[in-house]
Image (cartoon, rainbow, N blue to C red):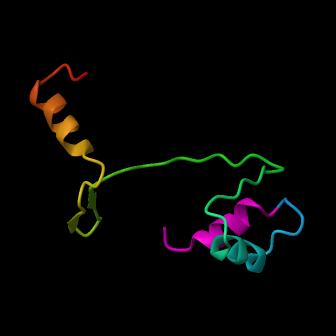
Amino acid sequence: MEKPAELATWALRNNPGWTLEKVQQGMQGEKDNVTVNLVKRVPVFVVYGTALAYENGDVHFSDDIYGYDATLAAALAKGYPYP
């Protein structure tokens, strides 16, 4: 994630007092983990991909740090109909 403190500040925007400075202090504090309940829920959509194709035809590959590509390759190797 490029800007975690800014994302946290945005997610906490409805929680009074959670400024960027306070979030940054919390991230650099003594505690490893701080739980803050959001006043308003934020929908999250997580995508994990190791290949990205751009409109100009470029394709970029990243390391599969979670090892999901092997599972996908095994499922695709079984052929249609895919599980």
Residue shown at 25% from the left, 62% from the top:
62
Q: How many marks?
A: 0
- Residue 12 found in image quarter: bottom right
Q: Residue at x 29, y 65 (%)?
A: 54
65 shown above or below 81: below
Q: Quadrant of residue 16?
A: bottom right
Viewer-side residue, 36 vs 14: 36
Q: Could you tell me which residue is drawn at 74 percent across and 77 percent down?
A: 20
- Determine whether 29 is above or below 38 in the image: below
Would you say residue 36 sits in the magenta stretch?
no
- 50 lies left or right of 80: right
* Magenta run includes residue 11: yes
Name the chief secondary structure element in magenta. helix
Magenta part of the chain: 1-13
Q: Is residue 44 left or right of residue 15?
A: left
Across and down, in percent, residue 21 comes to 75, 80
Q: Quadrant of the C terminus?
A: top left
| Residue farthest to the front, as pictured | 30
Percent of width and height locating residue 46: 48, 48
Q: Position of residue 53 (x, y in %)?
A: 26, 60
Q: Is residue 72 above or below residue 12?
A: above
Determine the residue located farthest toward the bottom in the rendered image.
Answer: 21
Q: Picture coordinates of residue 37 (x, y %)?
A: 78, 49
**Left or right, residue 44 beside residue 20:** left
Most extreme residue toward the right, as rendered?
Answer: 16
